[in-house]
Amino acid sequence: MLLGGSQNGYVGRIMTVTAIMLFLLSSATSLHAQEKFKTDCTPNFPFKQLWWGADAAYSIPLPDGRSVWIFGDTLYGDRRVVEGSDPRMVRNSIGISTCGDRNSWKVDYVVRRGDKGQPQDFFQAQHKGTWYWALDGFFYKNDLWVTLLCIRNAPKTTSAALGFETCGADLARVSGLEKDPQRWSVKYFPLVPDGVHAYPSATVVVEGDYVYIFALQEADLRPMLLTRIPLDGLDSPADHLQYLSKSGNWKPGLTPANAMHVMKQGNTEMTVRYHPGLKEWIAILNYPKLFSDLIIARTAPRLEGPWSEEKVIYRIPEMQKGSAGYDKDTFCYAAKEHPEFRQPGSLLITYACNTMNVQKLASDLDIYFPKVVRVPFP
């Protein structure tokens, strides 16, 4: 997200990445697996269609072969513009990617337009003075569901505060996916109110009769909690939300003080995906330390764990002194896996880089868009 002045609170999401596995092509008979594997298709994110960069970059495969990309703070216009400490941006946008004949990659960006054609957030804040970080999602019964983390400006009380704070979590149901994305209908559902300080949003998995949503607890070492909603309860998700308790039982609602820490440390953004060849879940995230250059992976036989200790799978070159693209103001975050684009023997991940010097966004076009890398496995 962007670090910035008064309105923007532009910056810091530091999170997400994965590892260790044997990639075998698998059938998509289980909700564990992606529906299609575009194994020779490699994403890239050119500047076009008035889109000038973004972060986050979760990908959600659709049954028809498209992938929906969820982007965070999105620069737009005929060029990058920064006025004072405020970049010209909307808070979130989406992309639609396809892999056609010969696995040719194509992505179309969608910045939502209002009634008068003005750019606006694709996912609209439901409370004054807030905005959404749109994060992970899933497809169910013809609709796309997306987790939304409520954000608002806050005083910079510490070096880690970065000028904003969380204020709840909601779910969005996106319908009409066969239409032009500008005409997609979005309906919002409250999930967890402000003040809980553990908001289900970080990453989403559909398994069996439930959708599981990981939640970062904003206390102590910032552990990951696990929540779930029965798929037949999505019409009222807050009423059907359950959390995994310290006793190992599922209980209604979300009580962080009584919740099991399924990972001892987590991140606001990450991915958890199942790998049939390994018969394990893989979590990919940035190392849970502010401004770390490490992308790590954890594995587990079940979503509840036990999750392994972290294994470093990639060191981000933009944060290595002496590497091309290094700048003392640059920091990188938002690591994620995209298994629908995987190849045997490797893992496809993305991450984003940003700058503490907001003015550099206007001149440095090598930062602030999803970077793509294939990480080999032992």
Image: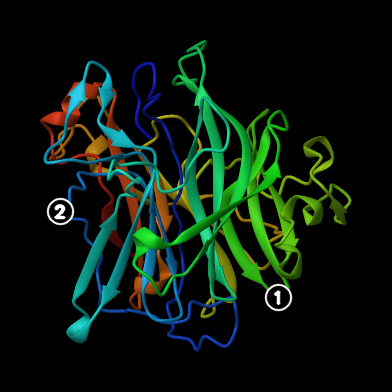
Q: Nearer the viewer, residue 271 or 116?
A: 116
**Which element carries disc 2, helix, strand or loop?**
loop
Residue 105 visible in the picture: yes
Q: Nearer the viewer, residue 256 or 100?
A: 100
The three-letter amino acid code for the residue at tag 2 is: Lys
Q: Any mark on residue 48, and which? A: 2
**Which element carries disc 1, helix, strand or loop?**
loop
Q: CA distance from mark 2 to mark 1?
A: 39 Å
Q: Residue at x 24, y 21 (%)?
A: 357
Q: Nearer the viewer, residue 190 or 361?
A: 190
- The quadrant of the picture occupied by the N terminus is top left
Q: In the figure, is residue 171 to the left or right of 351?
A: right
The three-letter amino acid code for the residue at tag 1 is: Gly
Q: Residue at x 70, y 59 (%)?
A: 305
Crowd rating for badge 2 (residues with CA inside 10 Å; few <14, some 14–19, many 20+): some
Q: In the figure, is residue 91 to the left or right of 317?
A: right
Toward which corner of the image does residue 223 lie, by quadrant?
top right
Toward which corner of the image does residue 44 lie, by quadrant?
bottom left
Q: Position of residue 249 (x, y in %)?
A: 88, 56
Crowd rating for badge 1 (residues with CA inside 10 Å; few <14, some 14–19, many 20+): few
Q: Position of residue 248 (x, y in %)?
A: 85, 55
- The quadrant of the picture occupied by the C terminus is bottom left
Q: Residue at x 17, y 54 (%)?
A: 49
Q: In the figure, is residue 285 to the left or right of 102?
A: right
Q: In the figure, is residue 72 to the left or right of 157?
A: left
Q: Nearer the viewer, residue 198 or 296?
A: 198
- The number of callouts visible is 2
Q: Any mark on residue 208, and which? A: 1
Q: Any mark on residue 88, and which? A: none
